Image (spheres, helix red, strand yellow):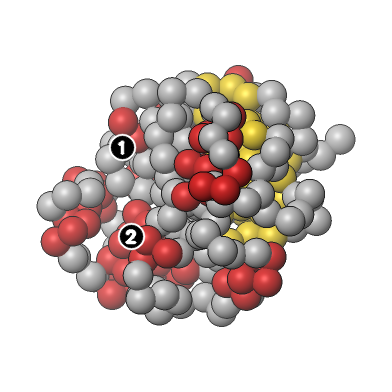
């Protein structure tokens, strides 16, 4: 039976990804692998990671904020200071130089990455990197999920913190609700029975909220902690 597995923010941790997938008995011929975004930066295996993910027959990512910086670098040699100095870009660029990745291969990688959506909506699942901004419903999510791919830039909203790539308010509300916060001060749960998967916010362990239909699975793989792979239907998970 085909399984639907999802991995939290990988951040260049190629060896950890392979270890977690081995623990999950991942079979690329039978299983589908999803991703919450931020495959890039901070880890030592960027080039090997992208080559591996590109080789999979059914890999279904969404874009994270680090992926936008990487995509722009691969397609246009963009090197903004916010990425290079503060968010692992210098080390990522160094890995591409160390492996002597050709300009043609960089372009292929960038075009491959650019095809990932900002939000992915399927029959049973919604996947977004950061979360769901306050006041958003299925109409807004479907609109952003249907946007055509771009090879550079992010023209969706003027304030990045109000986008599903950066926004954390849905997770914050779900966690506050678990501790008894008043509904009046929280973002309401999305009016959908689809399971929602997000990354972006490093946690000590996967967080599950049935009220918010939410699974948050960034467990700090890019910060020296665990990388998590989860079965999207059973909530079983494996870590490296």
Look at mark 2 in the image and give the residue it sits on.
Answer: 70
Query: Residue 11 at what x, y percent from top left?
Result: 37, 41
Is 209 drawn above or below residue 198 in the view shown? Answer: above
Query: Residue 120 at what x, y percent from top left?
Result: 63, 60
The answer to whether any part of residue 210 appears in the image is yes
Q: Horizontally, is 49 left or right of 79 in the view?
A: right
Depth order, front residue of 34/209:
209
Q: Residue at x 21, y 57 (%)?
A: 83
> Which sits earlier in the primary sequence, circle 2 or circle 1?
1
Query: Residue 131 at what x, y percent from top left?
Result: 52, 52
Q: Horizontally, is 112 left or right of 178 in the view?
A: left
The answer to whether any part of residue 25 appears in the image is no
Q: Residue at x 39, y 31 (%)?
A: 220
Q: Residue at x 52, y 59 (%)?
A: 134
Is 138 drawn above or below residue 223 in the view shown? Answer: below
**Pointer 1: residues within 10 angstroms few (<14), some, or many (20+)?**
many
Query: Residue 148 at what x, y percent from top left?
Result: 56, 79
Disc on res. 43: 1
Element on which disc 1 rests: loop
Q: Residue at x 14, y 61 (%)?
A: 81
Number of numbered markers: 2
């Amino acid at each position: 039976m085909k399984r639907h597995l999802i991995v939290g923010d990988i951040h260049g941790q190629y060896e950890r990804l392979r270890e977690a997938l081995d623990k999950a008995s991942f079979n690329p011929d039978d299983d589908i692998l999803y991703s919450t975004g931020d495959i890039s930066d901070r880890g030592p295996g960027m080039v090997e990671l992208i080559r591996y993910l590109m080789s999979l027959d059914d890999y279904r990512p969404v874009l994270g904020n680090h992926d936008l910086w990487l995509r722009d670098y691969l397609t246009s040699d963009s090197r903004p200071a916010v990425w290079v100095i503060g968010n692992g870009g210098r080390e990522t660029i160094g890995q591409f130089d160390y492996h002597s990745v050709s300009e043609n291969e960089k372009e292929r990688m960038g075009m491959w990455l650019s095809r990932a959506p900002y939000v992915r909506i399927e029959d049973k699942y919604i996947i977004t990197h950061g979360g769901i901004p306050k006041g958003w419903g299925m109409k807004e999510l479907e609109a952003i999920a249907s946007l055509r791919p771009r090879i550079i830039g992010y023209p969706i909203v003027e304030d990045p913190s109000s986008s599903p790539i950066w926004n954390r308010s849905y997770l914050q509300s779900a966690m506050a609700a678990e501790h008894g916060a008043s509904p009046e001060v929280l973002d309401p749960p999305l009016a959908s029975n689809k399971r929602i998967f997000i990354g972006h916010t490093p946690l000590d362990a996967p967080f599950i909220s049935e009220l918010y239909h939410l699974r948050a699975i960034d467990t700090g793989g890019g910060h020296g902690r665990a990388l998590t792979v989860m079965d999207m239907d059973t909530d079983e998970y494996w870590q490296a």
